[in-house]
Image (cartoon, grey):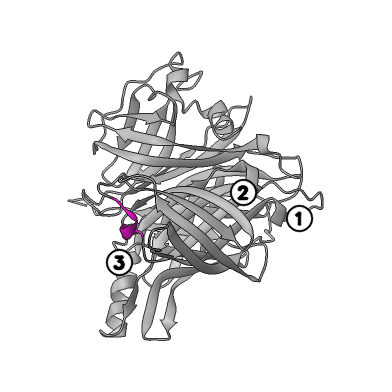
Amino acid sequence: MSLTRCLLLSSCLILSACAEGKKEDPPVSDVTITASHFMYGLGGDQLITDYPIPMSVVGTDAGFLSTTEDSTYTIKRTGTQASSSVGYHLEEDGSFYLVVPTSGAPTRYLGAYQQTGAGDLTQAFFFTDRYAPTSRPVVGFFWGTRSTTGHDMSDARDDWHVFSHHVIFSSSSSPNPNNIGRSFYGSLTIAEDAGKDDVITGTGFESSSPNAVTLSGTARALDTIGEIDFSLLYNADSRGIGASQAKDLILGLDRDETDGEIGLFGLVRKFEFGEPGDPDIELDKAKTALSGRWHIGLHTTFVAPTAAGIDAANGTLTISKTGGFKIEIVGSQGPGAGEDTYTGTWAFDEISPGKVWSNSITLSVDGTNETWHAAVDREYGALVLVDMTVEARPSGPSQLNIGLAIKEPVVSGS
């Protein structure tokens, strides 16, 4: 199977196999962490000219990322030994990178790490493989959560905002962007079913159709440190997803190629604000908490038939309290050709007009008539977002995106 093969051909993220490449002394991290993390990745070729998309040009990755106080990390995948120790660097503002050996000089996978202390607070990270050697230009996006202690499904039984994006292995030869990539946004509930796996019910919309999609299925804890197995139906489309939970966030991956698609999957726990307090004051507090600079990472699927492709990008998301936003990112083509900027407006979604709001957010993008959806965790430290529009762009191909934003912490003295 090509589950890890595609991502690792270029990245050498299976570090023990790349030990003969040039090494770099571990960076001295501004912030050091001793922790274990679930890691999930999706990636593929920068340019895909075959249609329908073959399984050989995209792939997934999953493993266990462990960091130590000596500024090094290892990765362990099921059935393999842990990789050699290599350096990481975490800055006080949350900027995060991993040193990755390659056949030449080491490269860096850029991302961000959420710093919210220990315990059961949400802990999330992302990093991007933007390294695309000419021999096989494969890039990828990775995200995950810190492992917890004593986790069981009681922590997950609740109402959630759900986000997903899938690369499609269509059997149809009719050119159609919806048969290359599809994004989803909706809501689901995880509820206990005595003596059985927990039951999932929900609904939402997919970028491929204006018609509502019904979610159903089951979920079960695989261990006591946060890993959850989801068996989902999007209408009648079966999708098996592995994910991990850290309090109000669940991040994961559909890595089963046999059911016609692979993709990323994220949940943000629902909450609401407004009444019974003063709605205007509560809304102002929420806007203040959301506003500021965020680190952002995106997985992109270009969905033009015979000119499709995969990209990974990272940069900044700036949110203003007055309702504007700006995303500035750099993808695998690097500064210049790989730069992209999105601007627009945002608003919390209303549950009761002028009285009660949700932690879900609608973003309207200037110039391309796109609508993105997002949701923020209760600490206003992590935000999952998805692009739901196959847009007609004035330049460049149509695309769909999913990603994670992590709030820059306030650094003392700044």
Q: Which residue carries the number 2 mark?
A: 301
Instruction: State the extent of the magenta-drawn residues as a range.
Output: 151-156
Q: In the image, is residue 267 above or below residue 63?
A: below
Q: Which residue carries the number 3 mark?
A: 289
Left or right for 318, reference 254: left
Q: Residue furthest top?
A: 20
- Please tell me which residue is depicted at 39% across the width and 30% down the height of the picture: 75
Find residue 400 and report its horizontal and vertical position in percent. Answer: 60, 55
Type of amino acid under label 1: Asn
The secondary element bearing badge 1 is classed as: loop
Give the mark, 3 or 2, whose residue is nearer the N terminus: 3
Find residue 83 and report its horizontal and vertical position in percent. Answer: 39, 24
Left or right for 131, reference 412: right
Q: In the image, is residue 182 above or below residue 279?
A: above
Is residue 206 inside the magenta stretch? no
The secondary element bearing badge 3 is classed as: helix
Type of amino acid under label 2: Thr
Q: Which mark is residue 176?
A: 1
